[in-house]
Image: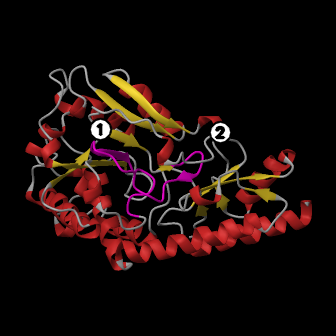
Amino acid sequence: MTRRYNFCAGPAALPLPVLEQARDEMLDWHGAGLSIMEMSHRSPEVVSVAERAEATLRELMGIGDDYAVLFLQGGASTQFAAVPLNLMGENGVADYVNTGQWSKKAIAEGGRFGKVNVAASSEDTNFSTIPPQSSWQLSADAAYLHYTPNETIGGVEYFWVPESAAPLVVDMSSTILSRPVNVDDYGVIYAGAQKNIGPAGLTLVIVRKDLLGKAHAQCPAMLNWKTAADNDSMYNTPPTFALYLAGLVFDWLQAQGGLQAMEVRNRRKAEKLYAAIDGSSFYANPVELQSRSLMNVPFTLADDSLDKAFLAEADAAGLLNLKGHRSVGGMRASIYNAVGEDAVDALIDFMQDFERRNG
């Protein structure tokens, strides 16, 4: 079997050892005579899988007992609504920072449930920068400050934590588990699974427990974090197979040396790819140096008429899903945890060969 290199922004590459273990356990999970997909979510087997996944995640991220860990459905986009419904209250206000397409979606959804103050925006630079906090106009009475630490489409990333009197709420979908974070800095961390956690269909919410129980009276039960916490994320049937796979990913991360080791590896991959882009007059990256994402690397060709040829030849060379988002164009390499250094090396070799033949 020949596996190709997958640079998709999501659903993204999964670690090969995880896929192999899931394959081996597919028909008969631990001698039970059936798949984990076929078991009741109330069964001791599935409950044990969920408990182990949570315990391993807490260890990896250093999550204290004052935080609830929720395994939910609906993707991070559902949390765009859940956040204001759980935190904004009636007639409330919240601060948002706009640094890209996912920030814009969160802002639009937040505005459906209360007053949104866009404290800062980098739209005037085509989302190629992170506005310095000195330029932010924060509300005195904000229920929370929401921002997106990494924008997958534009490839911009915060490498600092904003200062805020209000709880920080972050959509960490594309950076979670790629390096250590201080969970105590945040009121709420939420993330779709399909980049560094596991397959699509699972959403992680880490919420400080003192923020539970503040939901709007009209908040649906399925979006109420306290309901989820009170029921151990099993108010309804959770995405059991996705949760099982996430647990295997957490185990794999521990085996790699934890998040400190992943940060070293991820920085090395990104630095290598950016160096190849910057060392060429054929390729360019539009993001300011200090805001370049470690997870999503957009780049353009000097002659965009060669884009189709680049993508076709990359695909033939086993380098998949390099087309940039339609709103940005060009190329994008997403180099999440499961994308190995060998994949980045292969991409750089191809880019240099393509330049020699077309430059």
Q: Which residue is mark 2?
A: 126
Q: Nearer the viewer, mark 2 or mark 1?
A: 1
325 relative position to 132: left or right = right
Looking at marks 2 and 1 on the same chain, the residue that comes earlier in the sequence is marked by 2
Apparent side of residue 201 relative to residue 229 in the rendered image (left or right): right
Confirm whether the magenta stretch covers residue 335. no
**Residue density around tag 2, few if under 14, some if 14–19, many if 20 or more, within 10 Å:** some
Drawn side of residue 197 relative to residue 359, left or right: left
163 or 122, which is in the foreground? 163
Point out which mark residue 199 bears: none
Most foreground residue, 278 or 219: 278
- State the extent of the magenta-drawn residues as a range: 151-177
User: Residue 112 is drawn in which quadrant?
Assistant: top left
Examine the structure image and report whether residue 156 is included in the region drawn in magenta.
yes
Most prominent secondary structure in the magenta stretch? loop
User: In which quadrant will I find the N terminus?
Assistant: bottom right
- Look at label 1 and name its amino acid: Tyr
Residue 226: x %, y % from top left = 13, 39
